[in-house]
Image: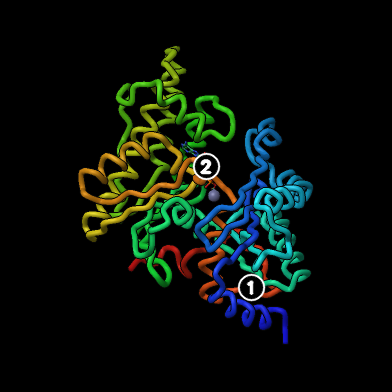
Amino acid sequence: MSYGECMRLQARELIHKEHVRILAIESSCDETAAAVIENGRSILSSEIYSQIPIHIPYGGVVPEIASRSHIEKLDAVATRALEKAGFSLEDMDAIAATQGPGLVGALLTGLSYAKGLAYGLQKPLLAVNHIFGHICANYLAYPDLAPPFLCLVVSGGHSHVIEVREKGFCLLGCTRDDAAGEAFDKAARVLGLPYPGGPHLDDLAEKGNPNAFPLPLPNPVGAYDFSFSGLKTAFINLVHHLDQKGETPDPADLAASFRHMVVEHLCERTMKACNDLGWDTLALAGGVSANRLLRRELSGLCKEAGVRLVMPPLSLCGDNAAMIGSAAYAQLMRLDTAGLDVNASPALKLFPDERLKR
Ligand code: KG4
Ligand code: ZN
């Protein structure tokens, strides 16, 4: 019997186990992370080594440097996660890693490391979709949360409105061009803010006037779709024109005006989906869910509409391995284990065709 077949049988036994503990690894971009998660809901430990200082001189993530740094840190980060959880490797019931989407070299380091552990221990291996992980961060924060619910996924590469169902997902809308995080990063760069731009722009915007500079509200055709490239271009042009005229606008006003329109667009489309389709629970997921205005605005709108809003705590908004462990548990319970032939998948999708609408 192959390793994969053996592990599927072992996974069957785990369905009935009282405490299922998973060591999860995340290495899709610029964080090397490991966590020990119990039953998909409790964080026993969560360790993150951030590579941000390494990439700052380059103004963005350098893929080759990211892969090398992951290789150097993975073992130490995973060992620390086990120590903090108070368990040994042998106590783990399964090993999980992010399969994609992300940087291929970075993904390969974590997935190969997890494969080696799983094979050595003869324990099941779970290959997790990073975006599913972001959604599952909410399960760690809200023990009673269960599908179905509506979810706005906003990260560096995704802006999706998704129905999360017991079995799978349904895509209601997505960006026609840039992702929200990408737009924040590009606008931040124009303002001369350091990488990663999104959080810096958010900080700056807190001190500015959101109505100082009128910018166009995007209006893509699909009712629940997004578009950020026109808004981004309008912002870049605005900054250049002001510069050419020799004006010195307050950067905080510029940041606040841009953030205001991105958040208004995200909220308008998401709340429309929520109201049109009668959802009573909305979840926020992905790195951009740390945005303070987005959190405030959605909280207010959901309160008005009588919709329950769940948002990951700030510690679980960015990339982390705890969310991968939570997603891995859900996969394990579905016996969705991986074989040793599983490969990193830089463009892994949540759906067979992410543009396919219901
Ligand atoms: O989910 P994530 O950590 O990585 C991906 O899976 O892409 O998201 C990273 C993105 C970056 O574009 C980053 O600038 C953005 O999330 N981001 C923010 C904030 N925190 C992170 N954007 C706006 N406001 C924030 N507070
Ligand atoms: Zn992410």
At x 62%, y 62%, the residue is 22
Residue 205 vertical position relative to residue 232 in the rendered view, above or below: above
Which is more toward the observer, 192 or 238? 192
Residue 281 vertical position relative to residue 155 in the rendered view, above or below: below
**Quarter of the rendering occupied by the N terminus:** bottom right
Q: Residue furthest bottom?
A: 1
Disc 2 residue type? Ser
Colour scheme of the picture: rainbow
Can you tell which quarter of the image residue 38 is in?
bottom right
Q: Position of residue 211 (x, y in %)?
A: 30, 25
Can you tell which quarter of the image residue 110 is in?
bottom right
Residue 247 vertical position relative to residue 102 in the rendered view, above or below: above
**Quarter of the rendering occupied by the C terminus:** bottom left
Residue 69 vertical position relative to residue 128 in the rendered view, above or below: above
Q: Which mark is residue 338?
A: 1
Q: Position of residue 318 (x, y in %)?
A: 53, 44
For mark 2, what is the residue? 315
Q: Earlier in the sequence, mark 1 or mark 2?
A: 2
Disc 1 residue type? Ala
Q: Position of residue 59 (x, y in %)?
A: 63, 33
Q: Is residue 216 left or right of residue 28?
A: left
Tags 1 and 2 in contact by the CB under 8 Å rule? Answer: no
Q: Is residue 285 left or right of residue 327?
A: left
**Is the CB of the residue bearing disc 2 within 8 angstroms of ligand 1?**
no
- Label 1 sits on a secondary structure element that is loop
- Label 2 sits on a secondary structure element that is helix
